Amino acid sequence: MPALTTTTDGFLLHGEPFRILSGALHYFRVHPDQWTDRLHKARLMGLNTVETYIPWNLHQPEPGTLVLDGLLDLPRFLRLAAAEGLHVLLRPGPFICAEWDGGGLPHWLTTTTNTTPTTTPTATPTPTPTPTPDIRLRTSDPRFTDVIDRYLDLLLPPLLSYMAASGGPVIAVQVENEYGAYGDDAAYLKHIEHALRSRGIEELLFTCDQTDGDHLKNGTLPGVLATGTFGSRVDESLARLREAQPEGPLMCSEFWIGWFDHWGGPHHGRDTADAAADLDRLLSAGASVNIYMFHGGTNFGYTNGANHHHAYAPTVTSYDYDAPLTESGDPGPKYHAFREVIARHTTLPTEPVPAPAPKLPLTTVRLTGRAPLLSHLAPPVRSTDPLTADELGQRAGYVLYRTTVPVKGAGLLHFTGGVGDRAQVFLDGAPAGVLERERYDETLPVHVPRAGAVLDVLVENMGRVNYGPRIGVPKGLLGPVTFDGAPLQGWDTHPLPLDDVPNTIEFTPPTTPTSAEPAFHHGTFDVSTPADTFLSLPGWTKGQAWINGFHLGRYWNRGPQRTLYVPAPVLRPGTNDLVLLELHGTTTPEAHLTDTPDLGPEQH
């Protein structure tokens, strides 16, 4: 019997009346050494529960594998939650949205399982895998449900001991995620329900859907608790939820108290008093709640997703979300306001609210070493026409495409199907232009300096779409390339996943103060006592940043985000290493560590 059960209008936990006061806290967006701190601050705000998604794409980077360590050590996170006295709502998807790369769906779903071509340099075209773009994601297509079953066969056994039925903290598990906004395949939802139950999940199951339109109708299951997602119009939203589900607890499983940002857009926020008033309305109505987000965290590495409604729009590195607990884990205005609201409805812990964590003193880092990116390439894959990154078996990062242009002179490069997502074009090493998916770029006027000039196209994956019908759209060059209508064939393609800085790189002092070619830059700085800090890069253009090998994520002077969060555990006493991959050029050899984040001017 599940620990959490329902009555006609509420929850019982172990037979006693219980209201879920939860906050979203994604373990995979927080440094593992900071999980305890964030969980403790959740309880001190008055929460009794935390919620987390499970990102399938990182836990299973290849079919048949399962990663449960480091940033992905979910069992450890669940143990720490239990030690803090918190219950857990688990949301395994398989689709999670979450502004996360691909919505959590693995990139290999839309290609064959043998996704890595031979990487030996050869003049003979390498056989490439056959893509399966016709697989119907998030449906009862057996090609999709079978691979879900194989994933759950691996994922769930290590988690069963953390279910409440076994004395663990997990009191409820979600079936899919806002499915009513995507489809109406009831057989698919039933399959997910059965997949969980048949693998030992006894806890309460629930669905979550937006409360407008037909979302609740399409996304719910008989016998499974329906919950709503909304950020305002509380009375109206609860009424729609009650209309869809005449009996049972009222719960807002995503109470949106902030929002996320896209590169080139504004930094979003929500008025604290407005959000607190709506939280009070929810609790005064007797509803349970999951605050989305309690603590947003960071899209470290290449984990950010993207939206594509009218145009492609990638999400920034920060997932601060204007949440009660800031990206660096400090209580913000919403933390104090929400704590006051929660105090009207339950008894708060007696411990005082923690003060903001100490920050590193202002530090300037001089980058004295440099290594051109295109001088450090792995052996290529040969093909007649360009291969997509997906055909190369690459989830994220970059791909370099190289061929020659047989004629000289002015002309038009045409990239059939466009690029995924941002391409820098070079002729004999000189920058020739940039194409971007968000602008629907497919053509570029160029001047070819000589017959046989080397054409390099460096394509950056800016994040896979996480919501809507464009999930699974490939990355890289998306079709053949022509110059003035003549096909350019015979491509050398170099995968550049760049999860880590290649250990073969040798940094040398730069011969010129600035250069427009993509390059790694290296510098060191000293730390006496590690503390949180923020990496500021005025004068730099676009690229990636690593400190002591930890991949902080993407920076871009397009904004709105101007600093990258550096968690204290990333630093060490003594000498620390900073590496930047700068794609364009810099006006300065310096970077700065500051004590204040800059996510851009806030727009409510």
Image (spheres, grey):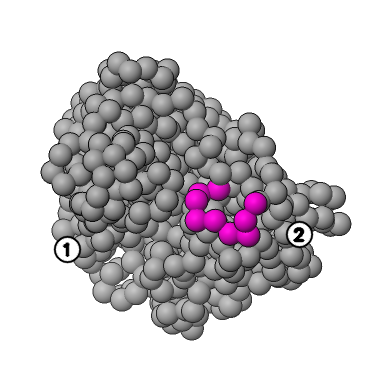
**Residue 97 or 411: which is nearer the viewer?**
411
Of marks 2 and 1, the one in the foreground: 2
Q: Which residue is mark 1?
A: 213
> Which residue is rendered at x = 31% and y = 56% of the image?
436
Three-letter amino acid code at the position of disc 2: Ala
Secondary structure of residue under mark 2: loop
Q: Which residues are magenta?
A: 511-519
Q: Where's the C terminus, which quadrant? A: bottom left
Three-letter amino acid code at the position of disc 1: Gly
Q: Is residue 409 left or right of residue 305?
A: left
**Residue 275 or 540: which is nearer the viewer?**
540
> Which residue is rendered at x = 51% and y = 62% of the image?
541
Residue 303 in view of the camera: yes
Relative image position of residue 577 (x, y in whole percent):
72, 48
**Residue 29 or 183: which is nearer the viewer?**
29
Relative image position of residue 215 (x, y in whole percent):
20, 57
Secondary structure of residue under mark 1: loop
Relative image position of residue 93 (x, y in whole percent):
36, 42
Q: Tag 1: Cα neighbours inside 10 Å, few (<14), some, or many (≥20)? A: few
> Which residue is rendered at x = 75% and y = 52% of the image?
524
Above or below residue 186? Residue 380 is: above
Q: Is residue 367 left or right of residue 478?
A: right
Relative image position of residue 19 (x, y in whole percent):
48, 60
